C-alpha cells in the first residue's frame, strides 16, 4: 500500500513523538545530563573479506535541539547530503503543551500543524495546513495519564475517511513496548514489539506483517564471511533487530549503536550488522 504524503507527514510526527516519553517532547531515551543538541548519524555497513564490518555511506542524519527545560524545539532530518530534507520547529504554551509545529521541506515551508486539546488533556487533534493555509488532513490522538499516546487515527487528505489507526502499549518507564497497526477498515496489518534494558535503551525490535502485501522475498546467506555458500530464499513477513551500545561520553551516554538483523537459521549470535549510528551530544553548562 502506498500511503498518501500527508499520512507519511503525520506518521513522521508520531514516530518523533513516541521516541520521547510523552507528547511534551521531554528528553527521555535514558539520557543523562541536560542535553542541548543531539546529533545522530546512521551509516550503512558493508562486510569486509575478513568478516569484519565497515561503515560506508550515510543513510540518514538527525539533529534534535532542546530547550533548557528539556523540551524538543527543533528537529532536522537529513538524508544523503548536508541540506536538511525536513526541518521542524515546535512551539509550546505557558503550560508546556505543544500548540504548533511548522515543517519545512527542502527549505520551503509546506505544512503548519496545529494542536487542539480537550479540557482534560486525554485527547487532542492535530490539524495539518498546507502552504496556502488550507486544511490538508487531520489526526486524533488519545493520551493516558502519564502523557503517552495510546492510540491514533489518521484520516485521508481532504475527507473524514479513516485511513489507518494504531494502538500502543507502554511499560512503567514510559517506553513503547507494542504497536498494533490497522487499516481504515480495522484489519490488522502488523504488530511491532520492543524490549529495553535497565537504562531504557531499546535492545530488541520485532515486527510481524499480517498483510502479505507488506512482506518481501529475501536472499539470505547464513555464512556471512563467504556469501557463496548455503544461501536460501524465504518470504519475509517478520523483521527482527537487536541493538548493541558502546563508546560512552563523559556524562555516561552512548556514542555508538550497532543494529543487527536476525535471520532464520543464522549461524552467528547477533546476525549481520545492518547499520551503525554514531551520536554526539552537546550539553547545557
Image (spheres, rainbow, N blue to C red):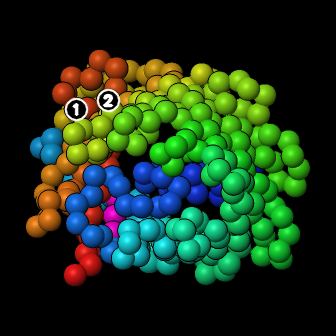
Residue 156 visible to the viewer: yes
Residue 63 visible to the viewer: no
Could you classify mark 1 by the number of other residues whose Cα lies within 10 Å: few (under 14), some (14-19), or many (20 or more)? Answer: some
Relative to 270, is 72 on the left or the right?
right
Residue at point 36%, 76% (across, down): 68
Q: Is residue 182 above or below residue 21?
A: above
Residue for badge 2 = 262
Check the image and name the residue furthest to the top.
Answer: 265
Whether 22 is among the magenta residues is no
Relative to 163, is 27 on the left or the right?
left
Residue at point 53%, 28% (across, down): 191
State which tag comes first along the sequence, 2 or 1: 2
User: Which of 193/126 is in front?
Assistant: 126
Magenta region, residue range: 38-42
User: Which of 122/262 is in front?
Assistant: 122
In whole angstroms, how far apart are the C-alphas of marks 2 and 1? 6 Å
Residue 19 location, x and y as percent?
A: 44, 51
Residue 44 location, x and y as percent?
A: 34, 54
Residue at point 39%, 41% (across, down): 175
SS assignment at label 1: loop
Say which quadrant the N terminus sits in. Answer: top right
Say which quadrant the C terminus sits in. Answer: bottom left
Relative to 102, is 71 on the left or the right?
left
Residue for badge 1 = 270
Amino acid at each position: 500500500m502506498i500511503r498518501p504524503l500527508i499520512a507519511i507527514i503525520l506518521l513522521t510526527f508520531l514516530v518523533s513523538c513516541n521516541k520521547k516519553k510523552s507528547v511534551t517532547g521531554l528528553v527521555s531515551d535514558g539520557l543523562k545530563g541536560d542535553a542541548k543538541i543531539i546529533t545522530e548519524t546512521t551509516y550503512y555497513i558493508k562486510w569486509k573479506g575478513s568478516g569484519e564490518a565497515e561503515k560506508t555511506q550515510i543513510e540518514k542524519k538527525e539533529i534534535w535541539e532542546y530547550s533548557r527545560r528539556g523540551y524538543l524545539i527543533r528537529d532536522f532530518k537529513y538524508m544523503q547530503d548536508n541540506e536538511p530534507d525536513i526541518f521542524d520547529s515546535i512551539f509550546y504554551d505557558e503550560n508546556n503543551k505543544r500548540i504548533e509545529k511548522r515543517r519545512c521541506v527542502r527549505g520551503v515551508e509546506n505544512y503548519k500543524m496545529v494542536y487542539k486539546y480537550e479540557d482534560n488533556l486525554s485527547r487532542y487533534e492535530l490539524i495539518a495546513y498546507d502552504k496556502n493555509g488550507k486544511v490538508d488532513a487531520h489526526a486524533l490522538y488519545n493520551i493516558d495519564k502519564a502523557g503517552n499516546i495510546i492510540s491514533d487515527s489518521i484520516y485521508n487528505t481532504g475527507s473524514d475517511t479513516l485511513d489507518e489507526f494504531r494502538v500502543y502499549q507502554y511499560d512503567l518507564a514510559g517506553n513503547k513496548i507494542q504497536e498494533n497497526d490497522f487499516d481504515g477498515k480495522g484489519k490488522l496489518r502488523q504488530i511491532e514489539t520492543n524490549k529495553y534494558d535497565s537504562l531504557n535503551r531499546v535492545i530488541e525490535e520485532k515486527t510481524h506483517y499480517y498483510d502479505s502485501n507488506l512482506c518481501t522475498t529475501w536472499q539470505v546467506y547464513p555464512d556471512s564471511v563467504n556469501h557463496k555458500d548455503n544461501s536460501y530464499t524465504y518470504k519475509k513477513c517478520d523483521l527482527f533487530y537487536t541493538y548493541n551500545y558502546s563508546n560512552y561520553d563523559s556524562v555516561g551516554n552512548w556514542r555508538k549503536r550497532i543494529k543487527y538483523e536476525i535471520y532464520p537459521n543464522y549461524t552467528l549470535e547477533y546476525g549481520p550488522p545492518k547499520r551503525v549510528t554514531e551520536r554526539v551530544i552537546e550539553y547545557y553548562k
